[in-house]
C-alpha cells in the first residue's frame, strides 16, 4: 500500500469515528448544546479539555520551538500547563457553582450590567476568532501535506467535519469527539517518541530517556547535544542565556492567558458538581502532561538526530569536534527523508561555498565568525523549518509507513478539537449572551436552540473564510488571544469571585483599561491592527518599554485592569445587596446541583 | 443565621489559606527553581544538565499536577468539615 493510501486510511477512519459520535450525541436542549447536559464525568471532561486545549500548535510546532530555543523555550511548557493550577483554585469551581452557560453570562450577571456583558462578548469573540484562524490553517496544512490535496480543499473538508458534529451535537457532540481526538493525537505523538528514545538511549520512556545516557557516545544525551550545537556556533541547549525578565513575564502571560481563555473555562461547566470541577482540572493537566512531558524529549532527541545526520562523525565518542565539523555529509548522500521534505519547501539547501557538502551551523553568531572563515564556510546552507521536528520524526527514526499515517490523523485531530471548542465558545456567546440576554429576552427554548445552531454555522463559515484568506496578522494571533484573555477576562473573573466590593463601573473601567493598554502596546510594535509597516517602533528589545516583549505584556495589562478596577470601585457605590449575596453563594459548593440553569 | 455566617466565613478563610499555600509552591517551582533561582541550583547535576533545567522542562509540570490533586483532596475535606459540600 502506498504512503498516500495509508494516510487516507488513517485519516478516513478517524473521521468515520467522529461522524459516528456526531450521530450518537445529538443535542436536544440548550443545556445539552451549551454544557453537554452538565453530566460529563470529571475524567471524561479532563480528556476533552486536554484535546480542546492542545491545538495544532502544541502538536506540530511546540517541540520544534523547544528544539530551536532549548532552555529559553521552557516558557511554553510551564506557561501552557501552569494556567491549570490557577483555573483549579481561582476560577473553575466558583464559575461551576454559578451554574450558567457562558463566560460573559457570569460577567453580565455578577456586574449586573449589559455593558459589561457586551464588552466581555467582544473580548471573547476577538480572542477566539483570532485563535481559530490558526486551527483552520493548521488543518489545511496537515491535509495538503499528507493527503496531497490543496490546502484550501483541506480547510473545506475540516470545516465540513466540524459542522457535522458541532452544529448538531453542540457541546455534547464536541465533548465526545474531543475524547476520541485526544486518544488519536496522544497515540500519534507518543509512538514515534518511544521509538526514538529507544534508539538513542535504550530507555523506552521519552521523558526519562531525555535525561539518560546517549548510547552511541556514552555521555548524557543533553551533554552530548550541548557539545554538538556549541561546536557549530549555536547557543548551548540547556544554557541559561539571559533574558530572565521576559522569560518570567512570558510564562506568567501564558499562564493567566490560559486561565482566562473562554473555550477552556466553559469545559468546566459540563461537570455535575463543584468538587468535580476541581478534580477535572487535575485530570485535564494529567492528559496534557502526557504530551507536554514527551515534547521536550522529542525536541532534544530530534535536534540531536538532525545534527548527527548532517555531521555523522559527531554521532559516537568525539575526541576532536573541530575535525568532526569539517566533514558534514555530501549533499548527494543525504537521506531520503531530507529529499522528501525538500519537496515541501520545509527544508532548503543552498551550497554557498560550492563544496558539495551541507554546512549546517549558526552563521549569525559573531563569536563564531573566526572559526567560520577558518573552516572555509560561507554561510549556513541548510534551512530547516521547526515543524520538521515532529512531522519528520517517524521518517528520521525509520519507522513504518503506518506511523506517518498516524501523525497525519493526530495533527488533524489536534486542529479540529481545538477549532470545535473555540467555535462553541463563539456561538454560545452570540446566541445566549447577545440574542437571548441582550436583544430578545423573550426567545423560546426552541428559538434559542435554532439561534445557537445558526450562530455555530455562521462561526464555522467565518472561520473557514479567515482560514482561506488569513489576514496579515495571522502570525500575531497568539499574542493577541493570550493578551486579551490575560489582561481583560482573567482579572474581572477573578475580582468577580474574590471581591464582594467590586462593582460594575469598576469592572467595566478595568476591562477597558486592560484591553486598551494591551492593544496599544501590541500595535506600537506589531503595527496598527497588525498591518505591517504601521508600527511606530521597531519590534526589537532595545525599543521595548523596560525591555518587555509584546508577547509578555499580558501581566502588565492585567495589572492595569486590577489597579483601575480597584480604584474606580472604591470611588463609586458598592454593588447592590443581592449581588453581594450572589458573590457569597458562588464561594460555597453547597447547592450547586440545585442551581437553576435558567 | 449568625452561626451560618461565621461558619461560611471560616470556610472561606480556610480555602484562601490553602490557595495561598498552593500558589506559593506553584510560583516557587516555576518562577523560582526554573527561572530566577536557577543559578543557585546549577551545582546539582541531573542527567547531563542541572536541576533548574529539569524543573523548567519537567519538574514544574509534575508539581502542578500534584498541587491540583492536593488542593481538590483538601478542599473536599474542608467542604465536609464545614458542612458546605454538596
Image (cartoon, rainbow, N blue to C red):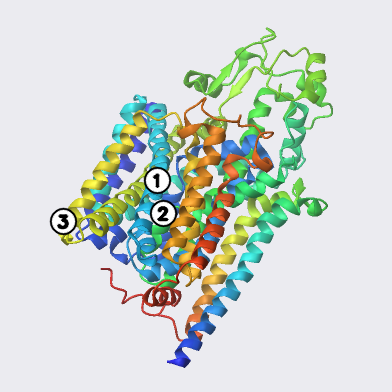
- Which residue bears the numbered disc 1? A128
In the rendered structure, the residue with mark 3 lies on which chain? A
What whole-number distance in Å separates the C-alpha atoms at marks 2 and 1?
8 Å
In the rendered structure, the residue with mark 1 lies on which chain? A
Residue B57 can be seen in this image = yes
What whole-number distance in Å separates the C-alpha atoms at marks 3 and 2?
24 Å
Q: Residue at x 30, y 46 (%)?
A: A17
Few, some or many residues within 10 Å of mark 1 (<14, 14–19, 20+): many
**Lower sequence index among marks 1 and 3:** 1
Instruction: Report x, y in % for residue B78.
Output: 52, 81
| Secondary element at tag 1 | helix
In the foreground, A272 or A560: A560
Residue A205 can be seen in this image = no
Rendered image quadrant of residue A472: top left
In the rendered structure, the residue with mark 2 lies on which chain? A
Q: Are marks 2 and 1 in contact (CB under 8 Å)?
A: yes
What whole-number distance in Å separates the C-alpha atoms at marks 1 and 3?
25 Å
Amino acid at each position: 500500500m502506498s504512503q498516500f493510501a495509508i494516510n487516507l486510511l488513517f485519516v478516513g477512519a478517524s473521521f468515520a469515528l467522529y461522524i459516528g459520535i456526531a450521530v450518537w450525541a445529538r443535542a436536544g436542549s440548550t443545556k445539552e448544546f451549551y454544557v453537554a447536559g452538565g453530566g460529563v464525568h470529571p475524567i471524561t471532561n479532563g480528556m476533552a479539555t486536554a484535546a480542546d486545549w492542545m491545538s495544532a500548535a502544541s502538536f506540530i510546532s511546540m517541540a520544534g520551538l523547544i528544539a530551536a530555543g532549548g532552555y529559553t523555550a521552557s516558557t511554553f511548557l510551564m506557561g501552557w500547563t501552569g494556567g491549570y493550577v490557577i483555573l483549579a483554585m481561582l476560577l473553575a469551581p466558583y464559575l461551576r457553582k454559578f451554574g450558567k452557560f457562558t463566560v460573559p453570562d457570569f460577567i453580565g450577571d455578577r456586574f449586573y450590567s449589559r455593558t459589561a456583558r457586551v464588552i466581555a462578548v467582544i473580548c471573547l469573540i476577538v480572542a477566539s476568532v483570532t485563535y481559530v484562524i490558526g486551527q483552520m490553517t493548521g488543518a489545511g496544512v496537515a491535509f495538503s501535506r499528507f493527503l496531497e490535496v490543496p490546502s484550501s480543499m483541506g480547510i473545506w473538508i475540516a470545516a465540513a467535519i466540524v459542522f457535522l458534529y458541532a452544529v448538531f451535537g453542540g457541546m455534547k457532540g464536541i465533548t465526545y469527539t474531543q475524547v476520541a481526538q485526544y486518544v488519536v493525537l496522544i497515540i500519534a505523538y507518543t509512538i514515534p517518541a518511544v521509538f526514538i528514545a529507544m534508539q538513542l538511549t535504550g530507555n523506552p520512556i521519552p521523558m526519562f530517556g531525555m535525561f539518560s545516557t546517549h548510547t552511541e557516545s556514552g555521555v548524557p544525551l543533553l551533554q552530548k547535544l550541548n557539545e554538538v550545537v556549541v561546536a557549530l556556533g549555536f547557543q548551548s541547549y540547556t544554557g541559561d542565556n539571559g533574558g530572565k525578565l521576559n522569560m518570567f513575564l512570558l510564562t506568567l502571560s501564558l499562564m493567566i492567558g490560559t486561565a482566562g481563555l473562554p473555550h477552556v473555562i466553559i469545559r468546566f461547566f459540563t461537570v455535575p458538581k463543584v468538587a468535580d470541577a476541581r478534580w477535572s482540572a487535575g485530570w485535564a493537566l494529567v492528559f496534557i502532561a502526557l504530551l507536554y512531558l514527551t515534547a521536550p524529549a522529542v525536541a532534544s532527541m530530534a535536534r540531536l538526530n538532525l545534527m548527527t545526520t548532517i555531521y555523522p562523525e559527531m554521532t559516537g565518542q568525539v575526541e576532536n569536534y573541530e575535525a568532526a565539523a569539517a566533514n558534514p555529509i555530501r549533499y548527494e548522500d543525504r537521506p531520503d527523508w531530507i529529499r522528501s521534505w525538500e519537496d515541501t519547501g520545509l527544508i532548503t539547501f543552498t551550497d554557498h561555498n560550492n563544496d558539495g557538502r551541507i554546512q549546517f551551523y549558526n552563521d549569525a553568531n559573531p563569536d563564531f565568525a573566526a572559526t567560520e572563515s577558518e573552516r572555509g564556510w560561507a554561510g549556513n546552507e541548510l534551512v530547516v523549518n521547526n515543524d520538521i521536528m515532529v512531522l519528520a520524526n517517524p521518517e528520521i527514526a525509520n519507522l513504518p509507513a503506518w506511523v506517518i499515517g498516524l501523525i497525519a490523523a493526530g495533527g488533524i485531530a489536534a486542529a479540529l478539537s481545538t477549532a470545535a471548542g473555540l467555535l462553541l465558545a463563539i456561538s454560545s456567546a452570540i446566541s445566549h449572551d447577545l440574542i437571548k440576554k441582550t436583544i430578545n429576552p423573550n426567545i423560546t427554548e426552541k428559538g434559542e436552540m435554532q439561534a445557537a445552531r445558526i450562530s455555530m454555522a455562521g462561526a464555522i463559515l467565518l472561520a473557514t473564510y479567515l482560514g482561506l484568506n488569513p489576514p496579515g496578522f495571522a502570525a500575531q494571533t497568539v499574542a493577541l488571544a493570550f493578551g486579551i484573555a490575560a489582561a481583560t477576562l482573567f482579572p474581572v473573573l477573578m475580582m468577580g469571585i474574590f471581591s464582594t466590593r467590586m462593582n460594575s463601573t469598576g469592572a467595566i473601567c478595568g476591562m477597558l483599561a486592560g484591553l486598551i493598554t494591551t492593544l496599544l502596546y501590541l500595535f506600537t510594535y506589531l503595527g496598527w491592527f497588525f498591518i505591517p509597516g504601521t508600527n511606530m517602533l521597531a519590534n526589537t528589545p532595545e525599543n521595548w518599554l523596560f525591555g518587555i516583549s509584546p508577547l509578555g505584556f499580558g501581566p502588565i495589562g492585567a495589572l492595569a485592569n486590577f489597579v483601575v478596577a480597584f480604584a474606580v470601585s472604591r470611588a463609586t457605590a458598592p454593588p447592590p445587596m443581592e449581588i453581594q449575596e450572589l458573590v457569597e453563594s458562588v464561594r460555597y459548593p453547597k447547592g450547586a446541583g440545585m442551581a437553576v440553569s435558567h | 443565621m449568625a452561626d451560618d455566617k461565621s461558619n461560611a466565613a471560616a470556610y472561606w478563610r480556610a480555602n484562601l489559606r490553602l490557595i495561598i499555600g498552593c500558589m506559593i509552591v506553584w510560583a516557587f517551582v516555576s518562577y523560582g527553581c526554573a527561572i530566577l533561582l536557577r543559578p543557585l541550583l546549577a551545582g546539582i547535576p541531573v542527567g547531563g544538565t542541572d536541576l533548574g533545567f529539569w524543573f523548567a522542562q519537567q519538574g514544574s509540570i509534575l508539581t502542578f499536577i500534584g498541587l491540583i490533586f492536593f488542593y481538590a483532596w483538601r478542599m473536599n475535606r474542608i467542604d465536609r468539615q464545614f458542612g458546605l459540600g454538596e
